[in-house]
Image (cartoon, coloured by chain):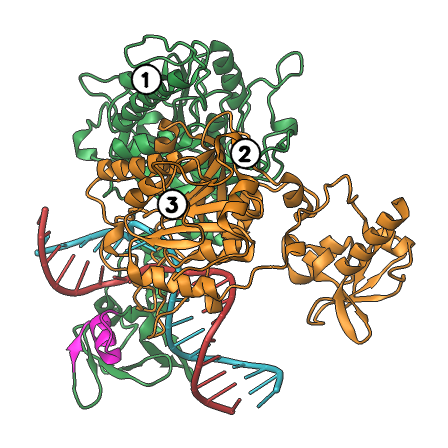
Chain colours: A green, B orange, C cyan, D red
Amino acid sequence: MRSVVKGAPGQAARRSGEHPSKLSVIAPLTTKNAPPLPLDEVLVGDSILELSKLPAHSVDLVFADPPYNLQLGGELKRPDESRVDAVDDAWDQFESFQAYDAFSRAWLMAARRVLKPNGTLFVIGSYHNIFRVGATLQDLGFWILNDIIWRKANPMPNFRGRRFTNAHETLIWAARDADAKYTFNYEALKAGNDDVQMRSDWLFPLCTGQERLKDESGRKLHPTQKPEALIARILLSATKPGDVVLDPFFGSGTTGAVARRLRRHFIGIERETGYAEAARARIDAVEPLPEEALIAPPSAREAPRVAFSVLVDRGLVTPGAELTDAKGRFRAVVRADGTIALSGEAQKVGSIHRVGALAQGAEACNGWTFWHVEQDGRRHPIDVLRARLRAEMGIAAE
Amino acid sequence: MRSVVKGAPGQAARRSGEHPSKLSVIAPLTTKNAPPLPLDEVLVGDSILELSKLPAHSVDLVFADPPYNLQLGGELKRPDESRVDAVDDAWDQFESFQAYDAFSRAWLMAARRVLKPNGTLFVIGSYHNIFRVGATLQDLGFWILNDIIWRKANPMPNFRGRRFTNAHETLIWAARDADAKYTFNYEALKAGNDDVQMRSDWLFPLCTGQERLKDESGRKLHPTQKPEALIARILLSATKPGDVVLDPFFGSGTTGAVARRLRRHFIGIERETGYAEAARARIDAVEPLPEEALIAPPSAREAPRVAFSVLVDRGLVTPGAELTDAKGRFRAVVRADGTIALSGEAQKVGSIHRVGALAQGAEACNGWTFWHVEQDGRRHPIDVLRARLRAEMGIAAE
DNA sequence: GGTTGAACTGAATCTTCGG
DNA sequence: ACCGAAGATTCAGTTCAAC
């Protein structure tokens, strides 16, 4: 069985893939030694083993919700597959930490191999494990971008009254490499947050009620099912539609359900057949959102570059026209080649940015917002003209 | 020079000391190899060296704000071209993660030796260092009780729009040993938190304005001075009056100032003479709170929750009376059922807390301290009326 | 004296492209 | 890889000068 999200695997991968030149057009995701990406599937098996079968540099985001503590029954294994014995005295606690670190190291290394060079990783944990996971991922070369706090709106109280209510969990967001050009949908997040930057502390309720998967007897299916809103915030922050999201501890499949709804591809790895099957059924029932609902708001960073000279060429600014700053303190004249000349005693010629900086005695200046033209008796930043041209170009392109 | 907080060292230590049977009554804090505790002093020197000179098992709490190892790149400018005054001090520079881990291990081991068996440690950090510190302290045998998030009310934004606003720092609270019978003032914290358990996420503004120490030229004295409210929350949570609080990275002496105000003893260790001297002067200027203000509040059982409606029922507030905030900007009318109605165009009815929040456009509000009544031409918070009622009820019960 | 607005500031791992 | 230039980017405060 296979849940297929709209769009063939090849298309999606090509859309968001790095190094397109290295990929064959016929079989874009196949190399001699690696099978194609099992997109939108739940792989049943050991995380580290399954990760090792996937091609390198093939996923955009890893979301991981690894086991939190050391009392894992038979689940915790060393990289050599030997089992870690449960221990409870003080000396063996140290031994257990070491074993947990080896486990973290193994899956983080495997995940890092599978990540695209510009990919990022989110991992969630509590104070029991997150410090060890964080240190380990730093040691492996991941570059932390943020730590993020999931503030629980409705945490479980501390029944014995001996500690603070454990009302949060910690996420670490890290790039594969320090110099990665990672995806971060800054403008969209800000627009959805009352036009202020999204902070590193996120408030969400626990996964309860209808959203919480139940087994036949009405008991919760999975002990640590995460709220979909939390995963959605992650995918909307650090991926684009069509991107590939891998979850090596898939559990009840929240990552897959959210990915399908948001039109991202997913790859799930889950060791227990029961969870994997429940996840597949859950994901199949998800209706992807209409594509219009996922269109990102315009991002200045991603808009095509338009040189000031093009505005002159197209006649939106006439050579000889006068530019001023917002308050009319500085003046400059537009030249036919798209440079401008500062008016006054010391005439300087250069780009809108350079001359704007010179006028203010600053090191740098965004000429698009600094310089204004007068139209209909009012001053407008020349950025307005650029926006007008971009709009025309967009129409022309269609 | 020596700042002396009320109470002789020996008395205080006896009051809060573990294992009194092991201490001589004549010289309670002196053993053959260890000098007496330098209470309420700032020791100038290397943290690890100075810690090693102190007697073992002698302090109740360690608060540590170690270097964060920020690893900043070039300079950063705000969108308005002003320069961000970064932490570029030599003491924050480490060769590698390995070097930082060795440093953490050394000071944590030294701190652990000095802690009483039932003592606890708070350490604060950011994602740059906190994961390493957390893993190290677990390795050393500390037992984590909580991680705590300081949510900054007014963090510095992310100027380049490439990450989430780094709006929090992380504290780890750990016991010296897993079986420690540590101090946790659960009832007091709950009572001061509108009778709900104190959560692991704390909201405080940065240390700015009058509280921030400045040098002769008006620049901030120390780059990372912490808000007193944050340290006060820690001392009120995990120590009792007379306890000994040690801060191995004393800096501008916030821990000492708060300890003195709350009638705890402190020991500060600071490497830089300039900071140590400023800290001493700062602490000397602190007036300890009256002892009555520090007596542990009656437990929740003794001080039953009093609903606002009971104040109305008992006639301490009359239906129809007007409530205002401290500055008289918002007004509300008391209704007979104990709800209040916001005055103005859009009348809102609800609890004192809810309507207070609505008035300010805030998420939450403590109506007891927000709303005031006018008596004898002066405004008093309605919390005063609640206190009066509780006093009457107490008398009635006796 | 009160009000308004500009200036300043805070533990920050803070860009991208083309030559 | 390095370098220079284009060009994108801020929130909640406090302080202080100007009215």
Q: Nearer the viewer, residue A45 or B237?
A: B237
Check the picture and name the quadrant holding the N terminus of chain B: bottom left
Residue at 42% over, 21% down: A249
Q: Nearer the viewer, residue B58 or A52?
A: B58
Asked if the stretch drawn in magenta spans residue B157, the answer is no
- Image: B330 above or below A167: below
Point out the stretch of residues depicted in magenta: A348-364
Q: Nearer the viewer, mark 3 or mark 1?
A: 3
Mark 3, residue position: B126
| Image position of A216 (left or right of B90) | right
Percent coordinates x, y for residue B167 in the rendering = 45, 51
Q: Secondary structure at mark 2?
A: loop
- Image: A190 above or below B374: above
Percent coordinates x, y for residue B235 in the rendering = 53, 47
The chain to which mark 1 is attached is A
What is the distance, in whole Å, between disc 1 and disc 2 at their CAs? 40 Å
Mark 1, residue position: A48
Kindly identify which numbered label has been placed on residue B227: none
Asked if the stretch drawn in magenta spans residue A360, the answer is yes
Mark 2, residue position: B182
What is the distance, in whole Å, between disc 3 and disc 1 at their CAs? 30 Å
Marks 1/2 in contact by CB < 8 Å: the verdict is no
